[in-house]
Structures are given as C-alpha cells and as structure tokens.
Image (cartoon, helix red, strand yellow):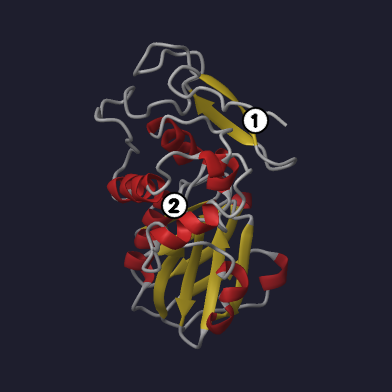
Amino acid sequence: MPEGDTVWQAARRLHEALSGSPLVRSDLRVPRLATADLSGRRVVEVFPRGKHLLARVEGGLTLHSHLRMDGAWRVYGPGERWRGGPGHEIRAVLATAERTAVGYRLPVLELLRTADEGRVVGHLGPDLLGPDWDPDEALRRLLADPGRPLGDALLDQRNLAGIGNVYRSELCFLLRVSPWLPAGDLPAPERLPALAKKLLEANKTRVARVTTPDDRRDRRLWVYGRPGRPCRRCGTPIRHARQGRAGEERATFWCPACQPPPVRRQP
C-alpha cells in the first residue's frame, strides 16, 4: 500500500512533466473512458490528496487515479523505452511534446468535473502533506472511536490521510505502544499527529524511506518488514500479524517488549 509521501512524489513528477503544456496524446484504457480524449487540453496541475492523484485539466476536468497496492505512474522522455510493465498493464497515457506519463496497473481511473472532486476525496481526513493539514482535527478523528485498535485507526484515511502499512508500524513503535492498543488509551496522544507529520515531511523528497537515525540500506526502518529479526532497541525478535477489519487486513510489525500488549480491562 503506497504511503502519502510516495503519492506526493508521484504528483510532483507528473506535475513537472505535464503541467502548462497541451496534451498531444490522451489514451485512457479503461472501458468507461474509451471515448474520452483530452488531447489539446492543457494540464493545469497535478495535485495529491492523501493517496489520491488529481490531474486537473483545462475545461474544468480532473483525471482521478489511485495506486492502491501496486499501481504506478512513470514519466518518459522522447524516444525513451517504457519500462514500467507489459503493455497490457497500461491504463493511461498522457503526453505533451516533451514528456509522456504512463499509468500502470491503476485500479482506479476516472474522469470527473473538477468541481465534483469532493465526491472522491471529500471523505478524507486532514492530509499530512497537504495545505489542509490540521493536527487537532486529525487527533479528534483518531480518538472519535476510543475502543478501536490504534493500528486500524491509523490506516483509516478518514482520520488522517497519507498513512499506510509502513508508517502505521513505525509510528506505533516510536510511540512505544502496541498496534492493538485502543486509540482512547494512547498516552500523550498529541504526540502522534506531530510525529506522523515529521516522518512524512522528512521522507517526501527521499528516494528511500528512513525512520531511524541510520540511512544505511539495512538500517532504515525500526520494525516494518523485519519479522523474526532483533529489535534495534532491545534485541527481542520482531513479530508480525494481519490486522484490520475482515477483507481489509494488512501486515503489522511490532516489538513485543518495547510495545507490550494492551492491558485487558475488567468487565
């Protein structure tokens, strides 16, 4: 699941490649957009909203895409070979005279009026990398269901937009709490939005994501993707499990010593 910083980087690449110039090619390879043609229209901007990409085009139109688990946008120069995947995985091609943007494996691709963007992103909470960031509102949303496990609440984009599996695990570790801790039991809860913001801001221009003080290839993350390996803080083997509502489970990683399980309340 891409994180907010990954989508922010994709939006920046697309904006730099396409904005300000008319499209000389528009090829949207999904059935409902088979007859749509944006050729001749100028791309006004490409804007990230949480994990959504909004390519705003002249004439009041927006091409909305979402990467989900393995979607990607790649940008190529004139004559450059497209290397993002086989041709049957291409869902969109947008080209100016100088650059071509190719969308691969996009599970969400739709064309809507720019005025109607709220229909697809209006439900999102404050965006950690957006102009609407509001830590107080993000915290209010996170704590609105105090019995919900914190790991679940962090992945819910209606609370704060931009956190995926990596930051979910890393944030819980840095806060020294279990991903299964009820959100309402989080100590010093005001630390969470500030820490989440700090991590995403620090990584939005990095090639490789880093949450530790060590930028070496095998030292960049505290717990994510390290099951069975020793905790960098105490040496206890890192554990992992699936967490989330039925049908929405995602891998969570934690240190059972640094992040002890929540104490069960007596009925």
| For residue 71, side relative to residue 100 (left or right) | right
> Rounded to the nearest whole Å, what is the CA distance between mark 2 and mark 1?
35 Å
The structure residue drawn at horizontal position 46% and vertical position 46%, both measured from the top left corner, is: 83
Q: Name the residue under label 2.
A: 4
Q: In which quarter of the image is the N terminus?
A: top right
Label 2: which secondary element: helix
Tag count:
2
- Say above or below: 204 vs 94: above
The structure residue drawn at horizontal position 38% and vertical position 26%, both measured from the top left corner, is: 222
Pointer 1 local density, CA inside 10 Å: few below 14, some 14–19, many at least 20? few
Nearest to the observer: residue 147 or residue 239: 147
Question: Foreground mark, 2 or 1?
Answer: 1
Image coords of residue 221 (percent x, y): 37, 29
Nearest to the observer: residue 228 or residue 216: 228
Residue furthest out toward the front:
267
| For residue 29, side relative to residue 177 (left or right) | right
| For residue 122, side relative to residue 129 (left or right) | right
Which amino acid, mark 1? Arg
Q: Do the residues labelled 2 and 1 touch (CB within 8 Å)?
A: no
Image coords of residue 141 (percent x, y): 54, 57
Please say whether residue 51 is visible from this viewpoint.
no
Q: In which quarter of the image is the C terminus?
A: top right
| First reached walking from the N terminus: tag 2 or tag 1 | 2
Q: Mark 1 points at which residue?
A: 265
The structure residue drawn at horizontal position 43% and vertical position 25%, both measured from the top left corner, is: 223
- Say above or below: 265 vs 229: below
